[in-house]
């Protein structure tokens, strides 16, 4: 019985995946515009950030849409299909759960932020224009 349930959900995921990706493309907002100097500062700050994610995770899609709205070039790391990223997430982040924002800090240990709402709040606080 378990195997039937597993295959049922795999089939559902297989059917829904293209629709989720198309909806993400259609509903992703246009990025905010900044001056060239301000965008350069944001680009530099984003070099210390990376988002561990699964391509079709609804919570990851939510975070990616907010990144697009804020015009943030944060590195995306696929923890579903890339074993190296998955291992890093498990070893350094503590668990394989996405989305996870890695905030690298030269002076301190890296911070690992889980939960899409927390990540979005952090990005808005740090990068949204007043």
Image: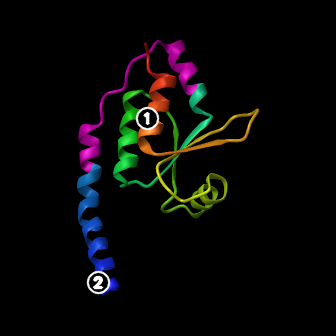
Q: Is residue 122 above or below residue 51?
A: above
For this view, does 107 lie left or right of residue 92? right
Principal SS element in the magenta part? helix
Q: Which residue is mark 2?
A: 4
Q: Which residue is mark 1?
A: 120
Q: Earlier in the sequence, mark 1 or mark 2?
A: 2
Visible in this render: residue 48? yes
Q: Is residue 47 above or below residue 36?
A: below
Q: Tell me the element at label 1.
A: helix
Which stretch is magenta? 22-43
- C-alpha span from label 1 to label 2: 37 Å
Is 35 magenta? The answer is yes
**Which residue ends up furthest to the right in the rendered image?**
107
Is 65 magenta? The answer is no
Q: Tell me the element at label 2.
A: helix
Residue at the spot x=34%, y=84% of the render? Answer: 3
Q: What is the total number of numbered labels drawn onto the structure image?
A: 2
Residue at the spot x=59%, y=55% of the render? Answer: 89
Residue 43 in the image, given as x and y percentages of width and height: 55, 26
Residue at the spot x=62%, y=56% of the render? Answer: 94
Few, some or many residues within 10 Å of mark 1 (<14, 14–19, 20+)? some
Q: Quadrant of residue 13?
A: bottom left
- Say the numbered circle drawn on residue 54: none
Instruction: Choose between 107 and 24: the one closer to the eye.
Output: 107
Q: Quadrant of residue 6?
A: bottom left
């Amino acid at each position: 019985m378990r195997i039937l349930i597993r295959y049922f959900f795999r089939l559902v995921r297989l059917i829904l995946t293209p629709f989720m990706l198309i909806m993400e493309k259609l509903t992703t907002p246009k990025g905010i515009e900044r001056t060239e100097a301000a965008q350069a500062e944001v680009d530099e700050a984003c070099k210390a950030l990376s988002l561990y994610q699964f391509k079709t995770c609804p919570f990851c899609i939510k975070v990616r849409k907010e990144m697009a709205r804020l015009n943030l070039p944060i590195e995306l790391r696929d923890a579903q299909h890339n074993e190296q990223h998955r291992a890093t997430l498990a070893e350094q982040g503590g668990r394989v759960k996405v989305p996870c924002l890695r905030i690298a800090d030269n002076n301190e240990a890296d911070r690992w932020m889980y939960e899409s709402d927390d990540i979005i709040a952090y990005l808005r606080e740090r990068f949204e224009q007043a």
